[in-house]
Amino acid sequence: MARILVVDDAAFMRVRAAKVLEDAGHEVTQAENGLEAVKKYNEWRPDAVLMDITMPEMDGLAALKEIKKIDPAARVAMVTAMGQQAIVMEALKSGAKDFVLKPFQPDRVLAALQKILAA
């Protein structure tokens, strides 16, 4: 299965997403902000990234842009709350392949992952 980096400043969201992905057979590592995400991406080179948009240190949009500089083929799905459509559109223009709305349903996370891995 795939190696997935889950990025969210809320520990319960990271743990929940990681459990869904691990239960589906994926290998998961976690980061709690954009800076840590860029560092872990560079070290671990995951097959896909599931990344929150709103985080301290470095937000998901800035981290997405940094990851795309490291690896233009990076596969990233953004996780967002309702009402962040403009940011989602910016993320898609910056190279995100999909997005998942919070609070997410496990099947939606798996569908987004399948979509970005096929991209």
Image (tube, rainbow, N blue to C red):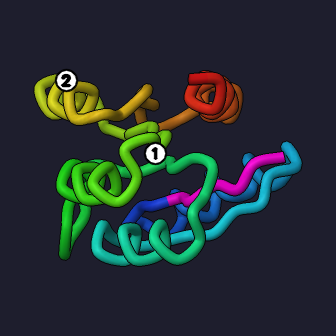
Residue type indicated by callout 2: Met
Residue 108 horizontal side relative to residue 102, left or right: right
For the residue labelled by badge 2, is the local secondary structure a helix, a strand or a loop? helix
Estimate the spatial distance between the alpha carbons at disc 2 and disc 1, rounded to whole Å. 18 Å
Q: Which mark is residue 74?
A: 1
Q: Which mark is residue 5?
A: none
Q: Is residue 83 visible?
A: no
Location of residue 95 (image quadrant): top left
Q: Residue at x 54, y 64 (%)?
A: 12
Q: Main secondary structure of the magenta part?
A: strand
Q: Is residue 25 above or below residue 10?
A: above
Residue 3 within the segment the image draws in magenta: yes
**Image quadrant where one finds the C terminus:** top right
Q: Position of residue 114 (x, y in %)?
A: 68, 27
For the residue labelled by badge 1, is the local secondary structure a helix, a strand or a loop? loop
Q: Is residue 27 visible?
A: yes
Residue 64 horizontal side relative to residue 4, left or right: left
Q: Nearer the viewer, residue 66 or 36?
A: 66
Q: Which residues are magenta?
A: 1-6
Q: Position of residue 73 (x, y in %)?
A: 45, 41
